[in-house]
Amino acid sequence: MFDFISKHSTIWLSLYLCGCVLMVAFVGGMFGGSAAGTVAGFLVLAGTMGYEMLSRYQAEKKIKSQVSTMGINHDRLTREMARTRGEMDGLKDDMARAAALLKKQQATQTAQSPLGENIASRIQQSLEKMGMRPRATVADTSRRYEDLTAASASRSDDIFPENDDIEMDRRMSSHPANYSDTIVSELVHHAVHNDRIEIFAQPIVKLPSRRLIYLELFARIRAKAGVYISADRYRELAEKETLMSDVDHLLLIHVLDSIRSDARRNVELGYFLNIAVSSLKDAAFMGDLLEFIKRNRELSQNLIFEIKQSEFNGLSPQMMAVMQGLGQTGCRFSIDNIDNPNMDVMKLQKLRIEFIKLDAAKLISLATSSEGEALIARLKNRLDAANITLIVEKIENDRDVVELLDFDIEYGEGYLFGKPDLEIAYRPKKAA
Protein backbone atom coordinates (compact mmCIF):
# COMPACT_ATOMS: atom_id res chain seq x y z
CA MET A 1 0.00 0.00 0.00
CA PHE A 2 2.84 2.39 0.87
CA ASP A 3 4.31 1.75 -2.57
CA PHE A 4 1.03 2.82 -4.23
CA ILE A 5 0.66 5.93 -2.05
CA SER A 6 4.30 6.97 -2.62
CA LYS A 7 3.83 6.68 -6.40
CA HIS A 8 0.64 8.84 -6.36
CA SER A 9 1.34 11.09 -3.38
CA THR A 10 -0.18 14.24 -5.00
CA ILE A 11 -3.54 12.57 -5.63
CA TRP A 12 -3.72 11.16 -2.11
CA LEU A 13 -2.76 14.51 -0.58
CA SER A 14 -5.50 16.29 -2.54
CA LEU A 15 -8.08 13.72 -1.49
CA TYR A 16 -6.98 13.97 2.13
CA LEU A 17 -7.23 17.80 2.16
CA CYS A 18 -10.67 17.71 0.54
CA GLY A 19 -11.83 15.17 3.06
CA CYS A 20 -10.46 17.27 5.92
CA VAL A 21 -12.31 20.39 4.70
CA LEU A 22 -15.58 18.49 4.33
CA MET A 23 -15.16 16.88 7.76
CA VAL A 24 -14.44 20.24 9.48
CA ALA A 25 -17.39 21.88 7.70
CA PHE A 26 -19.72 19.05 8.68
CA VAL A 27 -18.66 19.05 12.34
CA GLY A 28 -18.84 22.87 12.45
CA GLY A 29 -22.36 22.84 11.09
CA MET A 30 -23.48 20.12 13.50
CA PHE A 31 -21.63 20.94 16.72
CA GLY A 32 -20.26 24.46 16.37
CA GLY A 33 -16.88 26.11 15.83
CA SER A 34 -15.20 24.68 18.95
CA ALA A 35 -15.79 21.08 17.86
CA ALA A 36 -14.72 21.95 14.34
CA GLY A 37 -11.43 23.38 15.67
CA THR A 38 -10.77 20.23 17.70
CA VAL A 39 -11.43 18.00 14.68
CA ALA A 40 -9.21 20.22 12.52
CA GLY A 41 -6.38 19.83 15.04
CA PHE A 42 -6.71 16.04 15.06
CA LEU A 43 -6.73 15.93 11.27
CA VAL A 44 -3.62 18.12 11.05
CA LEU A 45 -1.85 15.86 13.57
CA ALA A 46 -2.91 12.73 11.67
CA GLY A 47 -1.77 14.24 8.38
CA THR A 48 1.61 15.18 9.89
CA MET A 49 2.12 11.65 11.22
CA GLY A 50 1.10 10.14 7.89
CA TYR A 51 3.50 12.39 6.04
CA GLU A 52 6.32 11.44 8.45
CA MET A 53 5.62 7.71 7.97
CA LEU A 54 5.55 8.09 4.20
CA SER A 55 8.81 10.06 4.21
CA ARG A 56 10.54 7.44 6.36
CA TYR A 57 9.26 4.63 4.16
CA GLN A 58 10.60 6.34 1.02
CA ALA A 59 13.97 6.96 2.72
CA GLU A 60 14.23 3.33 3.90
CA LYS A 61 13.30 2.07 0.43
CA LYS A 62 16.02 4.23 -1.11
CA ILE A 63 18.61 3.02 1.43
CA LYS A 64 17.65 -0.64 0.81
CA SER A 65 18.07 -0.12 -2.91
CA GLN A 66 21.51 1.41 -2.37
CA VAL A 67 22.56 -1.40 -0.02
CA SER A 68 21.39 -4.00 -2.55
CA THR A 69 23.36 -2.28 -5.31
CA MET A 70 26.44 -2.15 -3.06
CA GLY A 71 26.08 -5.87 -2.34
CA ILE A 72 25.93 -6.70 -6.04
CA ASN A 73 28.92 -4.49 -6.79
CA HIS A 74 30.85 -6.01 -3.86
CA ASP A 75 30.20 -9.53 -5.13
CA ARG A 76 31.28 -8.54 -8.64
CA LEU A 77 34.43 -6.88 -7.31
CA THR A 78 35.26 -9.93 -5.19
CA ARG A 79 35.00 -12.22 -8.19
CA GLU A 80 37.15 -9.87 -10.24
CA MET A 81 39.76 -9.85 -7.48
CA ALA A 82 39.73 -13.66 -7.30
CA ARG A 83 40.15 -13.87 -11.08
CA THR A 84 42.92 -11.27 -11.02
CA ARG A 85 44.67 -13.17 -8.26
CA GLY A 86 44.62 -16.32 -10.37
CA GLU A 87 46.05 -14.43 -13.33
CA MET A 88 48.75 -12.87 -11.13
CA ASP A 89 49.63 -16.28 -9.72
CA GLY A 90 49.96 -17.62 -13.26
CA LEU A 91 52.19 -14.67 -14.17
CA LYS A 92 54.36 -15.27 -11.12
CA ASP A 93 54.67 -18.95 -12.04
CA ASP A 94 55.78 -17.97 -15.54
CA MET A 95 58.28 -15.48 -14.13
CA ALA A 96 59.59 -18.07 -11.68
CA ARG A 97 60.14 -20.57 -14.51
CA ALA A 98 61.84 -17.86 -16.55
CA ALA A 99 64.09 -17.02 -13.60
CA ALA A 100 65.00 -20.70 -13.16
CA LEU A 101 65.75 -21.03 -16.88
CA LEU A 102 67.93 -17.91 -16.88
CA LYS A 103 69.77 -19.16 -13.84
CA LYS A 104 70.52 -22.42 -15.65
CA GLN A 105 71.69 -20.54 -18.72
CA GLN A 106 73.79 -18.32 -16.48
CA ALA A 107 75.59 -21.35 -15.07
CA THR A 108 76.56 -22.58 -18.55
CA GLN A 109 77.20 -19.27 -20.31
CA THR A 110 78.73 -17.01 -17.66
CA ALA A 111 82.06 -16.74 -19.47
CA GLN A 112 80.50 -15.83 -22.82
CA SER A 113 77.70 -13.56 -21.56
CA PRO A 114 78.09 -11.75 -18.24
CA LEU A 115 74.94 -9.79 -19.19
CA GLY A 116 72.82 -12.94 -18.70
CA GLU A 117 74.01 -13.16 -15.09
CA ASN A 118 72.87 -9.61 -14.43
CA ILE A 119 69.43 -10.25 -15.99
CA ALA A 120 68.85 -13.43 -13.94
CA SER A 121 69.92 -11.68 -10.76
CA ARG A 122 67.57 -8.76 -11.37
CA ILE A 123 64.57 -11.03 -12.10
CA GLN A 124 65.19 -13.09 -8.98
CA GLN A 125 65.45 -9.93 -6.86
CA SER A 126 62.18 -8.66 -8.36
CA LEU A 127 60.43 -11.90 -7.52
CA GLU A 128 61.66 -11.76 -3.94
CA LYS A 129 60.41 -8.17 -3.59
CA MET A 130 56.97 -9.37 -4.78
CA GLY A 131 57.00 -11.88 -1.93
CA MET A 132 57.25 -14.87 -4.26
CA ARG A 133 60.44 -16.88 -4.25
CA PRO A 134 61.33 -18.62 -7.52
CA ARG A 135 60.36 -22.27 -7.51
CA ALA A 136 63.09 -24.78 -6.92
CA THR A 137 65.19 -25.54 -9.96
CA VAL A 138 65.41 -29.01 -11.42
CA ALA A 139 68.68 -29.72 -9.66
CA ASP A 140 67.38 -28.34 -6.34
CA THR A 141 64.31 -30.58 -6.53
CA SER A 142 66.39 -33.66 -7.21
CA ARG A 143 68.76 -32.88 -4.31
CA ARG A 144 65.87 -32.27 -1.93
CA TYR A 145 64.43 -35.74 -2.38
CA GLU A 146 67.73 -37.55 -2.77
CA ASP A 147 67.90 -38.02 0.99
CA LEU A 148 64.39 -39.45 1.33
CA THR A 149 64.76 -42.72 -0.59
CA ALA A 150 66.80 -44.02 -3.50
CA ALA A 151 63.53 -44.68 -5.33
CA SER A 152 62.43 -41.06 -4.94
CA ALA A 153 65.75 -39.86 -6.30
CA SER A 154 65.51 -42.09 -9.35
CA ARG A 155 61.93 -40.94 -9.97
CA SER A 156 63.02 -37.32 -9.69
CA ASP A 157 65.74 -37.81 -12.28
CA ASP A 158 63.23 -39.43 -14.61
CA ILE A 159 60.58 -36.73 -14.15
CA PHE A 160 62.93 -33.76 -14.40
CA PRO A 161 65.37 -34.47 -17.24
CA GLU A 162 68.42 -32.37 -16.56
CA ASN A 163 68.41 -30.58 -19.92
CA ASP A 164 64.79 -30.78 -21.00
CA ASP A 165 62.65 -27.94 -19.62
CA ILE A 166 60.02 -28.43 -22.32
CA GLU A 167 59.44 -31.99 -21.13
CA MET A 168 59.15 -30.84 -17.50
CA ASP A 169 56.56 -28.20 -18.44
CA ARG A 170 54.62 -30.76 -20.46
CA ARG A 171 54.47 -33.08 -17.45
CA MET A 172 53.31 -30.26 -15.19
CA SER A 173 50.59 -29.32 -17.68
CA SER A 174 48.95 -32.74 -17.48
CA HIS A 175 46.02 -33.65 -15.22
CA PRO A 176 46.90 -33.63 -11.48
CA ALA A 177 46.01 -37.33 -11.25
CA ASN A 178 49.01 -38.02 -13.50
CA TYR A 179 51.51 -36.10 -11.35
CA SER A 180 54.17 -38.25 -9.76
CA ASP A 181 54.46 -38.52 -5.97
CA THR A 182 57.59 -36.36 -6.11
CA ILE A 183 55.80 -33.49 -7.84
CA VAL A 184 52.77 -33.69 -5.55
CA SER A 185 54.99 -33.79 -2.46
CA GLU A 186 56.92 -30.73 -3.64
CA LEU A 187 53.67 -28.83 -4.26
CA VAL A 188 52.34 -29.71 -0.81
CA HIS A 189 55.59 -28.49 0.82
CA HIS A 190 55.42 -25.26 -1.16
CA ALA A 191 51.74 -24.68 -0.29
CA VAL A 192 52.23 -25.28 3.45
CA HIS A 193 55.38 -23.19 3.77
CA ASN A 194 53.83 -20.28 1.85
CA ASP A 195 50.26 -20.50 3.24
CA ARG A 196 48.94 -21.21 -0.25
CA ILE A 197 46.20 -23.70 0.60
CA GLU A 198 43.11 -23.11 -1.55
CA ILE A 199 39.73 -23.57 0.16
CA PHE A 200 37.05 -25.34 -1.89
CA ALA A 201 33.42 -25.74 -0.89
CA GLN A 202 30.42 -27.88 -1.78
CA PRO A 203 26.87 -27.04 -0.63
CA ILE A 204 24.70 -29.24 1.59
CA VAL A 205 21.03 -28.41 1.09
CA LYS A 206 17.69 -29.00 2.79
CA LEU A 207 15.33 -31.26 0.85
CA PRO A 208 13.07 -30.82 -0.96
CA SER A 209 13.47 -27.00 -0.91
CA ARG A 210 17.22 -27.21 -1.78
CA ARG A 211 17.97 -24.30 0.54
CA LEU A 212 21.65 -23.91 1.48
CA ILE A 213 22.19 -25.00 5.11
CA TYR A 214 25.85 -26.08 5.33
CA LEU A 215 29.07 -25.81 3.36
CA GLU A 216 31.53 -28.67 3.29
CA LEU A 217 35.04 -27.21 3.10
CA PHE A 218 38.21 -29.00 2.10
CA ALA A 219 41.72 -27.94 1.21
CA ARG A 220 43.20 -28.29 -2.25
CA ILE A 221 46.75 -27.64 -3.39
CA ARG A 222 47.25 -25.24 -6.28
CA ALA A 223 49.45 -26.76 -8.98
CA LYS A 224 49.16 -23.83 -11.40
CA ALA A 225 46.56 -21.29 -12.48
CA GLY A 226 43.21 -23.09 -12.63
CA VAL A 227 44.67 -26.51 -11.70
CA TYR A 228 44.20 -27.89 -8.16
CA ILE A 229 45.14 -31.17 -6.49
CA SER A 230 42.41 -32.80 -4.40
CA ALA A 231 42.90 -34.34 -0.96
CA ASP A 232 42.44 -37.86 -2.36
CA ARG A 233 45.70 -37.37 -4.28
CA TYR A 234 47.86 -35.61 -1.70
CA ARG A 235 46.54 -36.82 1.69
CA GLU A 236 48.58 -40.03 1.91
CA LEU A 237 51.81 -38.25 0.94
CA ALA A 238 51.11 -35.39 3.35
CA GLU A 239 50.53 -37.85 6.19
CA LYS A 240 53.78 -39.65 5.45
CA GLU A 241 55.69 -36.38 5.61
CA THR A 242 53.73 -35.17 8.70
CA LEU A 243 52.23 -32.24 6.77
CA MET A 244 48.55 -33.18 7.05
CA SER A 245 48.10 -31.41 10.38
CA ASP A 246 49.62 -28.26 8.83
CA VAL A 247 47.12 -28.43 5.95
CA ASP A 248 44.22 -28.96 8.37
CA HIS A 249 45.49 -26.10 10.55
CA LEU A 250 45.40 -23.67 7.62
CA LEU A 251 41.89 -24.90 6.76
CA LEU A 252 40.78 -24.38 10.36
CA ILE A 253 42.12 -20.81 10.48
CA HIS A 254 40.19 -19.96 7.31
CA VAL A 255 36.96 -21.48 8.65
CA LEU A 256 37.22 -19.65 11.98
CA ASP A 257 37.55 -16.38 10.06
CA SER A 258 34.49 -17.31 7.97
CA ILE A 259 32.43 -18.04 11.09
CA ARG A 260 33.35 -14.68 12.63
CA SER A 261 32.46 -12.94 9.37
CA ASP A 262 29.10 -14.73 9.25
CA ALA A 263 28.33 -13.64 12.82
CA ARG A 264 29.00 -10.00 11.93
CA ARG A 265 26.67 -10.25 8.90
CA ASN A 266 24.00 -12.19 10.83
CA VAL A 267 24.38 -15.22 8.53
CA GLU A 268 23.49 -18.67 9.89
CA LEU A 269 25.68 -21.28 8.21
CA GLY A 270 27.43 -24.42 9.44
CA TYR A 271 30.78 -25.65 8.13
CA PHE A 272 31.86 -29.26 7.64
CA LEU A 273 35.66 -29.57 7.82
CA ASN A 274 37.32 -32.59 6.25
CA ILE A 275 40.25 -33.30 8.58
CA ALA A 276 42.49 -36.14 9.66
CA VAL A 277 41.86 -37.39 13.23
CA SER A 278 45.58 -36.94 13.94
CA SER A 279 45.12 -33.17 13.58
CA LEU A 280 43.15 -33.16 16.84
CA LYS A 281 46.44 -34.02 18.57
CA ASP A 282 48.37 -31.18 16.90
CA ALA A 283 49.31 -28.42 19.38
CA ALA A 284 48.94 -25.52 16.92
CA PHE A 285 45.60 -26.82 15.60
CA MET A 286 44.11 -27.34 19.06
CA GLY A 287 45.58 -24.07 20.37
CA ASP A 288 43.79 -21.96 17.76
CA LEU A 289 40.60 -24.00 18.08
CA LEU A 290 40.39 -23.71 21.88
CA GLU A 291 41.21 -19.99 21.77
CA PHE A 292 38.35 -19.48 19.31
CA ILE A 293 35.94 -21.47 21.50
CA LYS A 294 37.03 -19.52 24.57
CA ARG A 295 36.18 -16.21 22.89
CA ASN A 296 33.19 -17.37 20.77
CA ARG A 297 31.52 -20.20 22.67
CA GLU A 298 28.16 -19.53 21.03
CA LEU A 299 29.68 -19.95 17.54
CA SER A 300 31.38 -23.30 18.17
CA GLN A 301 28.23 -25.18 17.10
CA ASN A 302 28.91 -23.98 13.54
CA LEU A 303 32.04 -26.17 13.47
CA ILE A 304 31.46 -29.74 12.31
CA PHE A 305 34.58 -31.89 11.99
CA GLU A 306 34.19 -34.66 9.42
CA ILE A 307 36.22 -37.86 9.65
CA LYS A 308 36.20 -41.15 7.79
CA GLN A 309 34.48 -44.22 9.21
CA SER A 310 37.74 -46.16 9.00
CA GLU A 311 39.43 -43.58 11.24
CA PHE A 312 36.45 -43.47 13.59
CA ASN A 313 36.48 -47.24 14.07
CA GLY A 314 40.18 -47.10 14.99
CA LEU A 315 39.94 -44.31 17.57
CA SER A 316 42.12 -44.75 20.63
CA PRO A 317 40.67 -44.05 24.12
CA GLN A 318 42.75 -40.87 24.23
CA MET A 319 41.26 -39.57 20.97
CA MET A 320 37.75 -40.45 22.16
CA ALA A 321 38.39 -38.31 25.25
CA VAL A 322 39.51 -35.42 23.02
CA MET A 323 36.35 -35.69 20.90
CA GLN A 324 34.16 -35.84 24.00
CA GLY A 325 35.84 -32.72 25.34
CA LEU A 326 35.31 -30.83 22.09
CA GLY A 327 31.70 -32.01 22.04
CA GLN A 328 31.15 -30.48 25.48
CA THR A 329 32.35 -27.11 24.15
CA GLY A 330 29.72 -27.20 21.40
CA CYS A 331 31.72 -28.58 18.45
CA ARG A 332 30.08 -31.36 16.47
CA PHE A 333 31.29 -34.28 14.36
CA SER A 334 30.28 -36.08 11.19
CA ILE A 335 31.28 -39.43 9.70
CA ASP A 336 31.55 -40.07 5.97
CA ASN A 337 32.93 -42.78 3.68
CA ILE A 338 30.61 -45.23 5.45
CA ASP A 339 30.98 -48.83 4.30
CA ASN A 340 28.87 -50.44 7.03
CA PRO A 341 25.72 -48.52 8.07
CA ASN A 342 25.18 -50.81 11.10
CA MET A 343 26.86 -48.48 13.58
CA ASP A 344 26.73 -48.24 17.38
CA VAL A 345 24.30 -45.33 17.83
CA MET A 346 25.08 -45.05 21.56
CA LYS A 347 28.77 -44.57 20.77
CA LEU A 348 27.89 -41.95 18.16
CA GLN A 349 25.85 -40.01 20.72
CA LYS A 350 28.59 -40.24 23.34
CA LEU A 351 31.18 -38.72 20.98
CA ARG A 352 28.82 -35.96 19.76
CA ILE A 353 28.49 -37.46 16.28
CA GLU A 354 25.46 -35.56 14.97
CA PHE A 355 25.75 -36.34 11.25
CA ILE A 356 26.50 -39.36 9.13
CA LYS A 357 26.80 -39.40 5.35
CA LEU A 358 25.72 -42.23 3.07
CA ASP A 359 26.38 -42.62 -0.63
CA ALA A 360 23.23 -42.07 -2.73
CA ALA A 361 24.05 -44.95 -5.09
CA LYS A 362 24.46 -47.41 -2.18
CA LEU A 363 21.22 -46.28 -0.56
CA ILE A 364 19.23 -46.53 -3.80
CA SER A 365 20.79 -49.92 -4.50
CA LEU A 366 19.59 -51.17 -1.10
CA ALA A 367 16.09 -49.91 -1.87
CA THR A 368 15.73 -52.32 -4.81
CA SER A 369 14.68 -55.11 -2.42
CA SER A 370 12.11 -55.26 0.38
CA GLU A 371 14.84 -56.31 2.84
CA GLY A 372 16.91 -53.30 1.83
CA GLU A 373 13.96 -50.94 2.25
CA ALA A 374 13.35 -52.32 5.73
CA LEU A 375 17.04 -51.86 6.60
CA ILE A 376 16.96 -48.22 5.46
CA ALA A 377 13.78 -47.56 7.45
CA ARG A 378 15.26 -49.10 10.62
CA LEU A 379 18.47 -47.11 10.21
CA LYS A 380 16.56 -43.85 9.69
CA ASN A 381 14.40 -44.51 12.76
CA ARG A 382 17.42 -45.27 14.95
CA LEU A 383 19.23 -42.14 13.81
CA ASP A 384 16.15 -39.94 14.30
CA ALA A 385 15.67 -41.31 17.80
CA ALA A 386 19.29 -40.39 18.61
CA ASN A 387 18.99 -36.90 17.01
CA ILE A 388 21.58 -37.85 14.39
CA THR A 389 21.06 -36.32 10.96
CA LEU A 390 21.42 -38.48 7.85
CA ILE A 391 22.93 -36.67 4.87
CA VAL A 392 22.92 -38.42 1.50
CA GLU A 393 25.92 -37.44 -0.63
CA LYS A 394 26.89 -37.86 -4.28
CA ILE A 395 23.41 -37.04 -5.58
CA GLU A 396 23.77 -36.43 -9.30
CA ASN A 397 20.28 -36.21 -10.80
CA ASP A 398 16.66 -35.37 -9.95
CA ARG A 399 15.60 -38.99 -10.26
CA ASP A 400 17.77 -39.84 -7.24
CA VAL A 401 16.11 -37.05 -5.23
CA VAL A 402 12.63 -38.41 -5.94
CA GLU A 403 13.65 -41.90 -4.75
CA LEU A 404 15.39 -40.56 -1.63
CA LEU A 405 12.41 -38.45 -0.58
CA ASP A 406 10.42 -41.67 -0.23
CA PHE A 407 12.66 -42.43 2.79
CA ASP A 408 12.20 -38.95 4.36
CA ILE A 409 15.76 -37.93 3.59
CA GLU A 410 16.05 -34.29 4.68
CA TYR A 411 19.55 -33.27 3.56
CA GLY A 412 21.48 -33.84 0.37
CA GLU A 413 24.85 -33.11 -1.20
CA GLY A 414 26.19 -33.73 -4.68
CA TYR A 415 26.86 -32.37 -8.15
CA LEU A 416 23.13 -31.80 -8.67
CA PHE A 417 23.21 -29.01 -6.06
CA GLY A 418 26.71 -27.74 -6.77
CA LYS A 419 30.13 -29.03 -7.75
CA PRO A 420 33.19 -28.36 -5.58
CA ASP A 421 34.32 -24.80 -6.28
CA LEU A 422 36.23 -21.98 -4.64
CA GLU A 423 34.35 -21.06 -1.47
CA ILE A 424 33.39 -17.60 -2.73
CA ALA A 425 31.08 -19.21 -5.29
CA TYR A 426 28.73 -20.42 -2.54
CA ARG A 427 29.11 -17.76 0.16
CA PRO A 428 25.74 -16.17 1.10
CA LYS A 429 25.72 -12.44 0.33
CA LYS A 430 23.65 -11.50 3.39
CA ALA A 431 21.13 -12.88 5.83
CA ALA A 432 17.77 -13.83 4.36
Image (cartoon, rainbow, N blue to C red):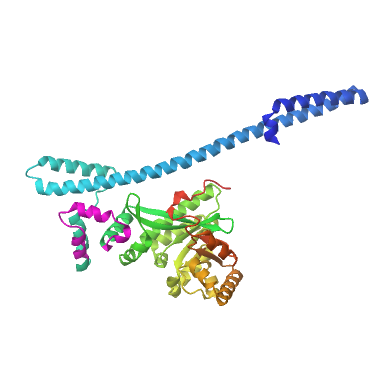
Above or below residue 183? Residue 112 is above
Q: Is residue 159 magenta?
A: yes
> Is residue 34 visible from the viewing direction of this image?
no
Viewer-proximal residue, 256 or 28? 28
Viewer-proximal residue, 37 or 173? 173
Residue at the extreme left: 111
Residue at the extreme bottom: 371
Viewer-proximal residue, 166 or 424? 166
Give the magenta range: 152-181
Where residue 329 appears, x then y in whole percent? 52, 63
Q: What residue is rendered at 32% in x and 61% in y? A: 177
Q: Is residue 178 magenta?
A: yes
Where residue 313 appears, x then y in whole percent? 45, 74
Left or right of 220 on screen, residue 334? right
Q: What residue is rendered at 41% in x and 57% in y? A: 251
In which quadrant of the rendered image does the N terminus lie? top right
Report the predominant secondary structure element of the magenta stretch: helix
User: Hey, which quadrant is residue 119 in on the image?
Assistant: top left
Q: What residue is rendered at 67% in x and 34% in y? A: 3
Left or right of 21 on screen, residue 73? left
Left or right of 99 on screen, residue 246? right
Where residue 394 appears, x then y in whole percent? 47, 62
> Is residue 67 visible from the viewing direction of this image?
yes
